[in-house]
Image (cartoon, helix red, strand yellow):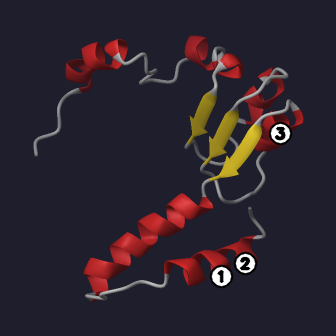
Amino acid sequence: MTPKPAAAILPSRNEAAIIAAVTAAAAGTYPTAELVVSALPPGATDGLAPLWTPAAGTLMDVVHQPWPTRFACAAEAAGRRVVGGLPMLVHQAAQQVVPQNRCPRVPHAEMLKACRSRAHTR
């Protein structure tokens, strides 16, 4: 599969109403979104935390350390449901272990439990 340049996917992005790039202008629209998925590095969303407004909706913050992030705390304080990204990250890691170690099965639940106890996360 050959990767396509970003310009080639922009028309489909617009048809699906998906913001494909983070810009200062776009970042200001997230407080009204029903679903926000943040996969930015730790601390990158700290300055956006005060922009949350009281409303229903969900934030999935993929950062696992530090947890919870300021962004997640502010979203929860504004009435949003907050979902941590640790289960997704553990699932990705488990899927890499299978081919690398020729394992037929990876103990996903045990890996998640171990990570949660170590990181004190949701």
Is 53 rendered above or below residue 42?
A: above
At a point 61% along the width and 31% down the height, the residue shown is: 35
Q: Position of residue 60 (x, y in %)?
A: 63, 43
Single out the residue that lies furthest toward the front: 56
Quadrant of the image occupied by residue 105:
bottom left
Mark earlier in primary sequence (3, 2) = 3
Q: Position of residue 75 (x, y in %)?
A: 79, 35
Label 1 amino acid?
Answer: Ala
**Disc 2 secondary structure class:** helix
Q: Is residue 66 left or right of residue 76?
A: left
Q: Position of residue 107 (x, y in %)?
A: 48, 85
- Nearest the camera: 62 or 17? 17
Q: Which residue is mark 1?
A: 114
Mark earlier in primary sequence (3, 1) = 3
Closest to the camera, between mark 3 and mark 2, is 3
For label 1, the crowd category at 10 Å Cα-Cα, with few meaning under 14, some 14 to 19 and many 20 or more, is few
Is 111 rendered above or below residue 70?
A: below
At a point 42% along the width and 16% down the height, the residue shown is: 17
**Disc 3 secondary structure class:** helix
Q: Which residue is mark 3?
A: 76
**Disc 1 secondary structure class:** helix
Q: How many marks are shown on the rendered structure?
A: 3
Q: Which residue is mark 2?
A: 118
Cα separation, mark 3 vs mark 1, equals: 25 Å
Cα separation, mark 3 vs mark 2, equals: 23 Å
- Nearest the camera: 111 or 8? 111
- Nearest the camera: 120 or 40? 120
Is 20 rendered above or below residue 99?
A: above
At a point 11% along the width and 41% down the height, the residue shown is: 2
Label 2 amino acid?
Answer: Arg
